[in-house]
Image: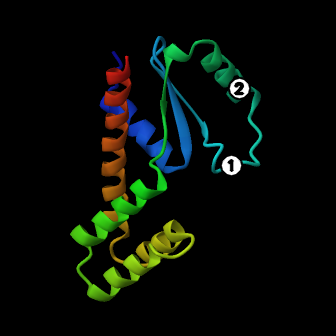
Amino acid sequence: MLSLTEKEVDFIAAQLIKGMVCFYQIDKKKVHFMPDDEDYFNYDLTPDEEDILDEIDAEPDNYAEFTRMEVPQEHQMMQDFIDRKVKEKNLAEDLVNALTKPKSLTAFKFLIDESKYKTEWIEFRKSRYLDWVREQVDGFNYAE
């Protein structure tokens, strides 16, 4: 059974927010992370990262993979934030409108970063990602 400390959950959540994919090595209780290849398709792996992936291929049952939320989940998280936290009608409308555009994540971030809600958004997103990591732990344990 996979069990993570709160510190490990927090570290993994922070890495996922940064666009990384994480692998938890069960026997050594160690977190490995690297850029998610879907986001960094021109990124060349370092020799250490290649070694980690080789180890994962050789012993997949010794690693738990943690991935970022999918785009629809990210959108739902942003919509939840708008519905629960944003009180100004004009800003809320602009944020909802940003979610309908191409590059919606970037547009949303730009508007939030220029608002008084930036810190609240960072905390809200972190909280959601902590829950997301815990859900993935539960999923890993259920699959075992």
The quadrant in which the C terminus is found is top left
Q: Which residue is pictured at 27% across the width and 86% down the height?
A: 89
**Badge 1, how many Cα within 10 Å: few under 14, some, many 20+?**
few
**Front residue of 102 and 88:** 102
Among the 4 quarters of the image, the one containing residue 119: bottom left
- Describe the element under mark 2 as helix, strand or loop: helix
Pointer 2: what residue? 48
* Residue 3 visible to the viewer: no
Q: Relative to 111, is 5 above or below?
A: above
Q: Relative to 21, is 107 above or below?
A: below
Amino acid, disc 1: Tyr
Q: Position of residue 71 (x, y in %)?
A: 48, 56
* Residue 72 visible to the viewer: yes
Q: Which residue is pictured at 32% across the width and 88% down the height?
A: 90
Q: Position of residue 41 (x, y in %)?
A: 72, 48
Pointer 1: what residue? 40
Report whether 56 appears left or right of 11. Answer: right
**Front residue of 99 and 17:** 99
Q: Position of residue 139 (x, y in %)?
A: 35, 29
Q: Which residue is pictured at 48% across the width and 45% down the height?
A: 68
**Front residue of 50 and 11:** 50
Marks 1 and 2 sit apart, C-alpha to C-alpha, by 17 Å
Q: How many callouts does the rendering have? A: 2
**Badge 2, how many Cα within 10 Å: few under 14, some, many 20+?**
few
- Describe the element under mark 1 as helix, strand or loop: loop
- Residue contact at pointers 1 and 2, CB within 8 angstroms: no
Amino acid, disc 2: Asp
Which mark is nearer the camera, 1 or 2? 1
Q: Which mark is residue 118?
A: none
The quadrant in which the N terminus is found is top left
- The way the protein has been coloured in the rendering is rainbow
